[in-house]
Image: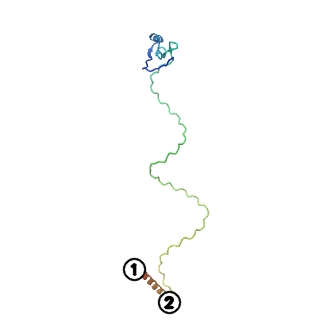
């Protein structure tokens, strides 16, 4: 049997015949690839070169496409799939979120450690207020004189230092 085409523009399409007898009357001898639609059987018949006769293919012509049917009900939800891989870090800069709440203080534990080394001596504090005069009677005259001489001596040394500093400022 030869091939069968259902194209309307096919030159082998001989058209529609009500019966096989009508086809045979119109085409007593076919050509390879020739076919026709027979209304009585609603099937295509084709020329068979081996038997030199028209043969029923059993194929019916395709009808027109019908209207679209209604959408069916939604099926059940399938199981959740596996988690996908983590995506790349974003290159979009966004605002920083607020600080979260402070966590619970952990338990204190462990023994107290050894006392550390003493730190360095701090700076000398400011001079306090002058105390009340002594009510003890004694040989203070000699000590007072020595103390006054000591103070004069310190003032002389301080005066000499100030003068040297001034000279250094004046003379290059």
Q: Which residue is drawn at the image coordinates 47% and 87% (left, top)? A: 149
Query: Residue 130's x, y, as percent?
Result: 47, 81
Quadrant (top left/top right/bottom left/bottom right) for the C terminus? bottom left
Q: Specify whether 48 is left or right of 115.
A: left
- Residue located beneath label 2 in the image: 142
The answer to whether marks 1 and 2 mark residues whose Cβ atoms lie closer than 8 Å is no
Query: Residue 70's x, y, as percent?
Result: 47, 29
Q: Specify whether 112 is left or right of 170.
A: right
Q: Considering depth in this image, is 172 or 87 the residue closer to the camera?
A: 172
**What colour scheme governs how the chains and residues are painted in the rendered image of this protein?**
rainbow
Q: Which residue is drawn at the image coordinates 41% and 80% (left, top)? A: 164
Q: How many discs appear?
A: 2
Crowding at label 2, few (<14), some or many (≥20) Cα neighbours within 10 Å?
Answer: few
Query: Residue 54's x, y, as percent?
Result: 49, 13
Query: Residue 111's x, y, as percent?
Result: 62, 63
Q: Residue furthest right?
A: 111
Q: Which residue is drawn at the image coordinates 50% and 89% (left, top)? A: 142
Using the image, tell me which numbered label, if any, was put on residue 29: none
- Residue 149 visible in image: yes
Using the image, tell me which numbered label, if any, was put on residue 167: 1
Q: Considering depth in this image, is 138 or 4 the residue closer to the camera?
A: 4
Q: Which residue is drawn at the image coordinates 44% and 84% (left, top)? A: 156
Q: Earlier in the sequence, mark 1 or mark 2?
A: 2
Q: Secondary structure at mark 1?
A: helix
| Residue 47 position (above or below residue 99) | above
How far apart, in angstroms, are the residues tagged by discs 1 and 2? 38 Å
Q: Residue furthest left?
A: 170
Crowding at label 1, few (<14), some or many (≥20) Cα neighbours within 10 Å?
Answer: few
Q: Considering depth in this image, is 108 or 88 the residue closer to the camera?
A: 88
Q: Secondary structure at mark 2?
A: helix
| Residue 57 position (above or below residue 172) | above
């Amino acid at each position: 049997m030869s091939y069968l085409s259902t194209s309307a523009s096919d030159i082998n399409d001989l058209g529609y015949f009500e019966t096989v007898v009508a086809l045979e009357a119109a085409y007593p001898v076919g050509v390879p690839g020739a076919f026709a639609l027979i209304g009585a059987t609603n099937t295509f018949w084709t020329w068979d070169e081996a038997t030199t006769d028209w043969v029923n293919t059993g194929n019916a012509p395709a009808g027109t496409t019908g209207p679209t049917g209604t959408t069916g009900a939604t099926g059940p939800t399938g199981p959740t799939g596996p988690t996908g891989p983590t995506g790349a870090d974003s290159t979009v800069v966004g605002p920083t979120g607020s600080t979260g709440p402070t966590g619970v203080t952990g338990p204190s534990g462990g023994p107290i450690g050894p006392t550390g080394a003493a730190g360095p001596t701090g700076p000398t504090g400011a001079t306090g207020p002058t105390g009340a005069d002594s009510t003890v009677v004694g040989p203070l005259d000699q000590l007072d004189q020595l103390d006054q001489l000591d103070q004069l001596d310190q003032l002389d040394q301080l005066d000499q230092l100030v003068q040297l500093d001034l000279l250094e400022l004046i003379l290059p």
